[in-house]
Image (cartoon, rainbow, N blue to C red):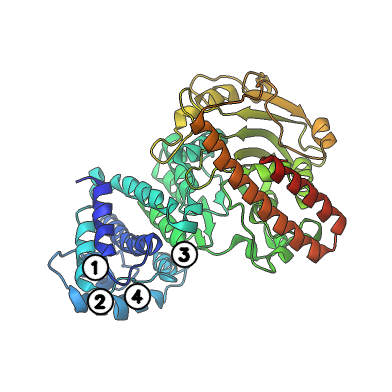
Amino acid sequence: MSVSTVIKSIQDIMRKDAGVDGDAQRLGQLSWLLFLKIFDAQEEQLEFEQDNYRAPIPSQYLWRNWAADDEGITGDSLLEFINNDLFPALKGLTAPIDKNPRGFVVKEAFSDAFNYMKNGTLLRQVINKLNEIDFTDSSERHLFGDIYEQILKDLQSAGNAGEFYTPRAVTRFIVQMIDPQLGETVFDPACGTGGFLACAFDHIGGKYVKTATDHQTLQGQIRGVEKKQLPHLLCTTNMLLHGIEIPVQIQHDNTLSKPLSSWESDVDVIVTNPPFGGTEEDGIEKNFPSELQTRETADLFLQLIVEVLKPGGRAAVVLPDGTLFGEGVKTKLKKMLLEECNLHTIVRLPNSVFAPYTSIKTNILFFEKSKAANKGTKEIWYYEVPLPDGVKAFNKTKPMKLEHFDDCADWWGEGKSQKSKLKRKDRQENQFAWKVSIDDIVARNYNLDIKNPHVEEQISHDPDVLLADYSRQQNEIQQLRDQLKGILAEAMTSKDVGVAQGEIRKVKAASRKGGNP
């Protein structure tokens, strides 16, 4: 039986339960069960490897002692144990991070977890399905990757939960280009389910870890923060499966909730896809400098990323087109970015990379924080990744693959591709690559939405293409309307009505055109 079949069977069982309502609750239920099973699998390995090992939680709550026996407790007895014993004990666990870090991880994982199922017999059936997979068996451990991918695919269609998903091809390309080294701090301030962090862990482990000491170093250099409970739990589970024994660096918190000035500039590498198209709760913007205050989430994260990078640190950030062409606070933010960092490359992604979650056009910004004043951006290279020949759009069944970045990797330089021996300074313009000087950027009032000068605009009469374009335009119009609401809110706060009116005219013009300003 395939992993996807197992997961489908589990979800079909949950659909029979009166307490589980919708995909998000099914995923939440599955996630805490998976966490406990995988945590116990790692416990068994640690017990075998270490003398005098002490379990971080009471033994009766380990998976093996209440769930592993397919003929074990079921029905009302199982529900009573989980609801009145297991959950209260793990939520209230006394586990100081310095004395019992793995216990602390369990307590954090269960802080907002919930047992939705009301039928103990159905719950036992779900547990027995999970018992078909043995995570202590090295030949089966990789199956979690398949389970994880299935969960992520389901997250895409689970309403707002889909915002945590970044296609694996994008995370792998970004990490390969950034090339984090052993000992460098790797941070994702909006880590979601941990795709970037897991990819960075695998990259460093595969290229640079040679000894047991190296492996311990690697375990301590991965850091992340996630605001929402479900992706945080999935991320913690993901880190456990990747071999991080004590993933206390994966915090359940809102990265933006403390003042920007309180952060230290101590991070070597940031790889992230921060939430975009949304706004933060009232008061969060007060944690940022007055001239850069906004409630738009992506803009706040970009400020934080620049702040926490150490001089010489490097970052890759996925951002929407709206960040590139936006004005007002966005203009000030881009000016700050270009002055304090070397924004050396913008990779423009095809429209449908994040389909079906969104058709908003996105970009990857690669930059390095300058080590000295007046050492910011001098020129920006652009690379437009085309759709493969014969492909009109990516979708759930035919997603973007890492190989679709091959030409970009060959062009990139610095030996990032097996074929490429170039350095970044040796880059050449081609059909998909062009560069723009900082003087031209300043003359454009920091508008970074620069089209490929080597490609003429093509008009298609293919009905499928026209329908896809129409859908994309409607999404972009909605995004622009959301930006308009944010602009009005900022104007009410800052009383900068002149700037707001200019923004409004721009957004209205773009809406009439059905495209970007």
Amino acid under disc 1: Leu
Amino acid under disc 3: Gln
Indicate which label's residue lies in the foreground, 3 or 1: 1
Find residue 16 and report its horizontal and vertical position in percent: 25, 66
Mark 4 → mark 2, Cα distance in angstroms: 11 Å
Residue sitting nearer the eye, 222 or 452: 452
Find residue 471 and report its horizontal and vertical position in percent: 55, 42
> Which mark identifies residue 87?
4
> Which mark identifies residue 123?
1
Q: Are marks 1 and 2 in contact (CB under 8 Å)?
A: yes
Q: Residue at 66% of width from left, 18% of height from top?
A: 428
Kindly state the secondary structure of the residue where label 2 is placed.
helix
Amino acid under disc 4: Phe
Q: In the displayed structure, does residue 379 sit left or right of residue 107?
A: right
> Which mark identifies residue 229?
3
Find residue 284 and report its horizontal and vertical position in percent: 68, 65
Residue receiving disc 2: 79
Residue 376's image quarter? top right
Q: Earlier in the sequence, mark 1 or mark 2?
A: 2
How busy is the neighbourhood of tag 4: few (under 14 within 10 Å), some, or many (20 plus)?
some
